[in-house]
Amino acid sequence: MSLESEKKAAFAFSTLSKSEEQTLYNAFSYEKYKKGTLVFVQEISRVEKLFIISKGSVAYYFEQDNTQPLKGTLLPGDCFGGLSILFNDAMAIHTLRPLEETVFLTIDTTAFAGLCKKNKGFREYFTNEFGRCMLNKTFAHIIARQVLNKALNLPFFNQPISAIFRPNIATCTDLTTIHEAALKMSKHNSSAILVKSDTHEIQGIVTDADLREKVLAQNISPLAPVSEILSAPLMSISSDSQVFEAFLAMIQKDKRHLAVYGKSGDISGIITEKDLISAQTRSTFLLIKSIKAAQTMAELENIHSKLEIMLLDPIRNGASAEYITRLITTFSDAIIDKVITFSLAEAGPPPCKFVFLTMGSEGREEQTLISDQDNALIFEDLGNIEAVKSAKTYFDHLSQLICTRLDMAGYQFCDGDNMAQNPKWCQPLSVWKQNFTRWIRTGNPEDLLYSSIFFDFRGTWGEIHLSDSLKTYLLNSIQGWSGFLRHLTENALYFRPPIGRFGKFLVDSEGENKDAFDIKQAMLPLIDFTRVYALKNKITQTNTLTRLFRLYTKNILTNKEYHDIVQSYNYLMDLRFRRQITTIMDEETKPDNYINPGNLSYLDQQMLREIFKMTEKLQQKLHYDFTGIA
């Protein structure tokens, strides 16, 4: 039986007045779909119209764990989408696929919502239908699951713990050996285990920290009973408590684990500090999900600002900088994918194969909350001169569409015009190879600037083999022109860490950023150091941390050098993120990279001094290895 039967649908429309019928008639459109076309995908597609089947038949279903627990067939007169629009934030509850060529009458959301608002009987049809559907446990579970997903978009700290908590519990008796308890923790993939008495009362908790600090550090035998190392009393919190209460409890009582109890008072599991931090980042994936479901550019307008808001709490509460930059990269790639899809729909089919490149920090997958564009476009070489001209005209237009839409989404135009919409940076592969050859062999300041931006490129959309071909050409060309790396090194040495003699920080003496230094500039020596050695050793990856790891595995860096640089890079990136959320939250301005050392703790100041001293030593090493001058 369909969710909305023909008879009931007819009843819904019979409640309309003549003027409403005329409004409806004027709002109708016809849409035809071939057999097997995916009209909607559950939890992904946005439903922007009410669909009434005029001719044909369609299957609807909800898929979960390779099964379809809720499915059915809709026939002429049945309608689809009303419940999704009214009760599921316009997100498709089911997947919809025609069983044969099907014609729909459609009414857009605005007209449909207007009728619901004006006509009580019309709306009550859908309200009553939703109530009947909710009697079905499977349907109710689907709605509850989707409501939970949407709840993650609420301000994170105002959510109940139940929204992010999943019951999980590992227990043992107080007579269990430490070794057996550790094995059980490992089996349950848990960082803690609850210890019970012989009367099944919870006596306390043993965490992985207890195993480290009490067993290993104090040399307690793993055969001793677990009661010797448990922590008591057990700190607990209600599943109805809000997330900020859990954070406060952990901070005030210096705990990393809290037992969670339900309405019955029974402990149902453990929530950890790590759980709270990782749960915050899940909302980002829901945002990415909405990007993939977008049907118009209006849905993506200034969407980058939403990412900033969603990442504030994870950054503030200790999520690693590496993980945050990966999330930002995934987000940006999803935007690019959607923007190019929209742009191709307007420009028409491309005349030949092409690839869209991201460069600079985005090419290195190291973007922060400051977003601007560094991109380019490569299209394949064509033998015919007229074909090349025609393709160039097409891709110049396409690039203009792409960059304009990225700006609409919140990615500002590059001040240096290093974007695909600049005709210089929208070229066939052969021209890009000529550019790279000139930059490698000339070595003048402008060419070196271009190389520092363009050589950190990554194929993001399209025929990736074109960008791979250019990467191979670049690395091979450098091997045959060693003077380029010398020039690149000399250029890199212009960027010195902002520290003077006797450990004094070098800051701006006047202007808007008085008493501060640019941490982005302070990080450049580490990025440049890594780039030069990566190009020398034909490492294709662009991400700084990945390049460092490859250099380490090739024995270019010692174990100490590798770990010191990685630790320093991550610390600086974390400090950079912390500065950016301060500008957004406390100063209510756009994020920037300016750090005032006077606002840092003594420990942070000392850490920066050590990092900058290490950076100077790395530059000396770079200078010696590529210029021969100590």
Image: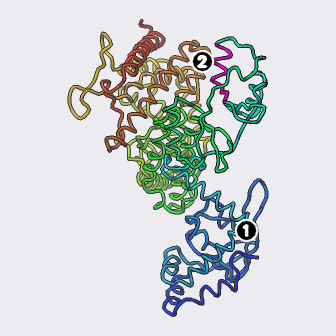
The residue positioned 52% from the left and 79% from the top of the image is: 116
Cα–Cα gap, marks 2 and 1? 58 Å
Contact check, label 2 and label 1, Cβ < 8 Å:
no
Residue 387 image offset from top left, x and y in percent:
53, 53
Residue farthest toward the top in the current orientation of the protein: 630
Q: Amino acid at mark 1?
A: Asn
Q: Is residue 119 magenta?
A: no
In the foreground, 40 or 175: 175
Q: In the image shown, does 226 or 389 lie closer to the viewer?
A: 226
> In the rendered image, which residue does mark 2 sit on?
552
Residue 468 visible within the image = no
Magenta segment range?
204-217
Residue drawn at x 79%, y 58% is 67
Residue closer to the observer: 123 or 568: 123
Q: The N terminus is located in which quarter?
A: bottom right
Mark count = 2
Mark 2 or mark 1: which is in front? 1
- Residue 251, x across and y down, in percent: 49, 32
Q: Residue at x 69, y 11 (%)?
A: 219
**Position of residue 522 measured from the top left corner of the image (x, y, whole percent):** 38, 24
Say which mark, if any, is on residue 136. 1
SS type, badge 1: loop
The amino acid on which the numbered mark 2 sits, given as a three-letter code, is Tyr
Q: Residue 589: x percent and y percent?
A: 32, 44
